[in-house]
Amino acid sequence: MKIRFSDLLSDFLFEYETPRQVLVKNKRVGVVCRLIQLGVLVYIIGWVFIYEKGYQSTDTAISSIMTKMKGIGVTNENGTARIWDVADYVFPAQGASSFVVMTNYIMTEGQQQGTCPEPQANCTSDTDCKGGTFKRTGHGQLTGKCLTGVRKCEIQAWCPTENEPKTPDPALLMSSENFTLYIKNSIAFPEFKVSRSNLVEDVNITYLTSCIYDPKNNPLCPIFRLGDIVKLSGFQYADIAKEGGGIGIVIDWKCDLDFPVRYCKPDYSFYALYGDAQKTDSTQSSLGYNFRYAKYYMENGTEKRTLIKVFGIQIDILVWGEARKFDIIPTLTAIGSGVGIFGVATVVCDLVLLYVLPKRDLYKNMKFKHTEIQEKKPASNLDDGNTANEGAGLH
Amino acid sequence: MKIRFSDLLSDFLFEYETPRQVLVKNKRVGVVCRLIQLGVLVYIIGWVFIYEKGYQSTDTAISSIMTKMKGIGVTNENGTARIWDVADYVFPAQGASSFVVMTNYIMTEGQQQGTCPEPQANCTSDTDCKGGTFKRTGHGQLTGKCLTGVRKCEIQAWCPTENEPKTPDPALLMSSENFTLYIKNSIAFPEFKVSRSNLVEDVNITYLTSCIYDPKNNPLCPIFRLGDIVKLSGFQYADIAKEGGGIGIVIDWKCDLDFPVRYCKPDYSFYALYGDAQKTDSTQSSLGYNFRYAKYYMENGTEKRTLIKVFGIQIDILVWGEARKFDIIPTLTAIGSGVGIFGVATVVCDLVLLYVLPKRDLYKNMKFKHTEIQEKKPASNLDDGNTANEGAGLH
Amino acid sequence: MKIRFSDLLSDFLFEYETPRQVLVKNKRVGVVCRLIQLGVLVYIIGWVFIYEKGYQSTDTAISSIMTKMKGIGVTNENGTARIWDVADYVFPAQGASSFVVMTNYIMTEGQQQGTCPEPQANCTSDTDCKGGTFKRTGHGQLTGKCLTGVRKCEIQAWCPTENEPKTPDPALLMSSENFTLYIKNSIAFPEFKVSRSNLVEDVNITYLTSCIYDPKNNPLCPIFRLGDIVKLSGFQYADIAKEGGGIGIVIDWKCDLDFPVRYCKPDYSFYALYGDAQKTDSTQSSLGYNFRYAKYYMENGTEKRTLIKVFGIQIDILVWGEARKFDIIPTLTAIGSGVGIFGVATVVCDLVLLYVLPKRDLYKNMKFKHTEIQEKKPASNLDDGNTANEGAGLH
């Protein structure tokens, strides 16, 4: 028996295999199966394709942020008015994506290296003050002497030590509520080679000079009033200004690049960070934000510093960008796995057909053809002669 | 009819089900179907596997950046030369991934808290200057007095207020063009437990002391000339130095970890941020970058400050890392959904076979077997007797 | 031949197609195929569903970080003790996610603009010092004069220039080993609308006042001893304190949101950045971290500065968050593609059946039905009459 390769090839090329099928004319199983198949179809088209846009591939954004605060603050301590401008109350100065706006402070002026009493270490004699040691939360190194006048251990430190009375209440810089924050945000989707700025088409220079962000009326204005930010994040301004706290501004870019790029717009939202904004109780471990900062200067050849314990609003601008665009691979993967789920539907229908319906033995015999005579099983009464033959593999 | 479980189990174990198929010997449908199947195969193997590497799973990088500027700048104001070194012109000092190189500035020396005229508030009498108010873009709080000599309202502020003439043109620190930036970048792919540094195998200490990044000749050198960065991002150095601007340096890690890790190398690219680099027209809302910064000092017991409006190049280093590695799950998912798409090909061919070809009725009868006699439909002339019997379910 | 639409519809609705199959009663092929199918089933259920949780969709976190250092350092230079507190040794002050703790320094006090010798430029006469030029790594601009006394070119610079002897060894601030770092981390999964803080349920204010992080005993305590961080990252404290270096603290959030959110906890790990922690040899290009920082002051009307070359530990806190939650789409995609892989199993079994087994021709004839008489091929001896008829398409 000689088989030529060209014959095999032409057989392969010009032949088409298609599965033989039984058409079961049964209303019950027919309707059940069509419903299952309809469900699968609705799922694939409605859910995967239309609702979840499974025909698109996604890309996440890389992003740059530039910020600029504006506004003048006034404090009035002991009758002396003092003006605070942006160079005084923003840390760091250069407009980073994470920065602090000072709203309250404890200032200790004229500190210099020397010895003074440690407010946290009480003593009655020198034996209470072990020289050379220091407390983790203290201000300096114990010299070993007990200052019997004030009954405190002497330390070497920046003296005088910080005067830690109660945090000023109300906050000294309550006028910070009217400061404004201007955010410039630039994003790029490297895979799709698309880049955008939050100064979108509608935001021109005229609009910028007058607008203030408002979730309803000016949702695209990139200039925010500090008081509004605090309110939208759920804090009370008086509380956060006094104790300090963290606020996250999330810029959400969800872009469907199958539409023109001008529909790709930022969405701003505001969150309380590090805890629940509703609980401003200071016993909560997750509240309050402060840091210490020093301005150094020379006075008569001696280095001195002004230590400032800054309470403020830490603003963290987080960008979350996701772009979607039609792509052939997720489309075909979705279709392919959809066909697979159709296969599951067929399996379910077959189970109904072969194990549940009263005529199941007939259907079994029509569906299956056996390769060997099954002598153990008697031929079912439902089988007609031909089918029995087929089952017996003689056909 | 007693059925034993062991019989069923052995039936299940030793039996194999395979679909019965019709082999349609028709050149047209054969070639069409083979072409469709070939297309699907080429798509799955060529596109999904080879081009898109669908057999790999992906991981995104976490990354750390350390930067260091080098270079000396010289300015010459009113005949007085002044040297600027890295401690003077980089903000912040500690080498963050986002920083500013000062290229131009307006300096206001000797400011102290006091009263002076507000340049933005003209007046003719005290009634024009409402005491206690302040403008958002002003310098301080109005005292309510009109300084009739200069016809400006008096404010309490850091005085004298910033002298805002035109921005110095050309930029004072044009010599910044030759500053160099050294970037250290460390990335890790947590899923794959791989970490890399941008100081790859070829970048040794000898190379580092002499190289300057060049996209063609030295694409792996991590030392960049500021002028080159600006040029590659599309800006003119004179423009950006004068007005300030943002530049993004994207370090792109695309690693195929099925190859040795030494092939995993960074790729640097440079983008203009916050707007179109081609339009340096200052009326564009998206151009220009500056911030105000103060150096505080004590003079004769009075706190004073030097206010500097810094114009500069904000450099934002963004890392975008993606590693890919063979993984069994995406491989099998791709194969599985590919088989599903093969199923779609079969459906298309079946439609051609059963509804388009002239012999469609013959093929229909061969493919389908009906469970009931269909009396409504007359037997097609193309059907031979046996096929009719089969169609009638008597077979 | 008139076909009514309603007939077609009822045919479609009440009919069910199911593939006809051959039941091959052959132990070898049966067992092989059942094993292959079992393998696929185990893979889909065991690997994709249980091990890799393929029924879940994923979301990555956006995150905010707040840090706070505590501790007092003491240095002793030339017999003068000096106390360093957090305002002195942390850069930047405001508690960012990436910051530097100073551990060693070279201080150059009293610099002012003027002329002085450039330590790096030797000369014998003025011709060796080209006026107006400057070296990239130098300190200032050459005036063109050669200072014959010290045989160095004169430069205009911040004078005196930095005294660069060897880096102090051991590090001046070795006491930094006991500093503590408190990390507050807030994350959110925007898709799942879940947010968490690293101050999880078990971390209350009492615990916070006393705990120190320990990988075994206190893995959730957010207060870290600097010496522990360095040790866990693989560095020797004495080395990194002297030369400086980078350490990454990775906060890993892997949350299965099908469980209650309280099980979603952070995991801290520590990495050496920018090179191999085991090699502290300073000839390695990837080791050492320092930056220059200046404190400006006025003295008798002249601007002066203290330049500090800071060696320190750069700490970079990186958050890597991934949440997973049951989702219908990945579930059905996994099932669908699993069914596809089942299809591959069938193809493999068919190949065995039709090309390997001795009775392959019988199986071929049972599986396939030809549409045309194949005259070239003689009927196989194994075929009985009926099968030949079927193969000939007359059946």
Image (cartoon, coloured by chain):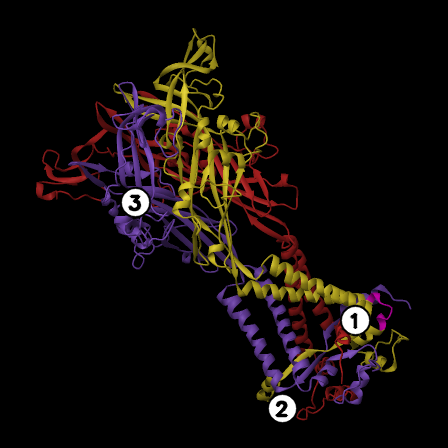
Chain colours: A red, B yellow, C purple
The residue that mark 2 highlights is B2
Do the residues under discs 3 and 2 have CB atoms within 8 angstroms?
Answer: no
Tags 1 and 2 both on a single chain: no
Q: Is residue C159 above or below residue B34?
A: above
Which chain is mark 2 on? Answer: B
**Residue B333: image x %, image y %?**
59, 64
Residue B294 visible in the displayed image: no
Q: Single out the residue that lies furthest toward the top.
A: B149
Q: CA distance from mark 1 to mark 2?
A: 49 Å
Which chain is mark 1 on? Answer: A
Tags 1 and 3 both on a single chain: no
Q: Is residue C316 above or below residue C44?
A: above
Q: What amino acid is at disc 2? A: Lys
In the image, which residues are magenta? B355-361
Determine whether, in the image, residue C139 is placed left or right of residue A376: left
Determine whether, in the image, residue A232 is placed left or right of residue A262: left
**Residue A233: image x %, image y %?**
46, 40
Residue B359 on the magenta segment: yes
**Residue B121: image x %, image y %?**
47, 15
Q: CA distance from mark 1 to mark 3?
A: 76 Å
The residue that mark 3 highlights is C243
Q: Is residue A270 above or below residue B144?
A: below
Q: Which quadrant holds the N terminus of chain C?
A: bottom right
Q: CA distance from mark 3 to mark 2?
A: 86 Å
Determine whether, in the image, residue A21 is placed left or right of residue B255: right
Q: What amino acid is at disc 3? A: Glu
Nearer the viewer's eye, disc 3 or disc 2? Answer: 3
Nearer the viewer's eye, disc 1 or disc 2? Answer: 1
Question: Looking at the rendered structure, which numbered label has been put on residue A14?
Answer: 1
Specify the quadrant of the image occupied by residue A177.
Answer: top left
Specify the quadrant of the image occupied by residue B113.
Answer: top left
Frontmost residue, A74 versus C131: C131
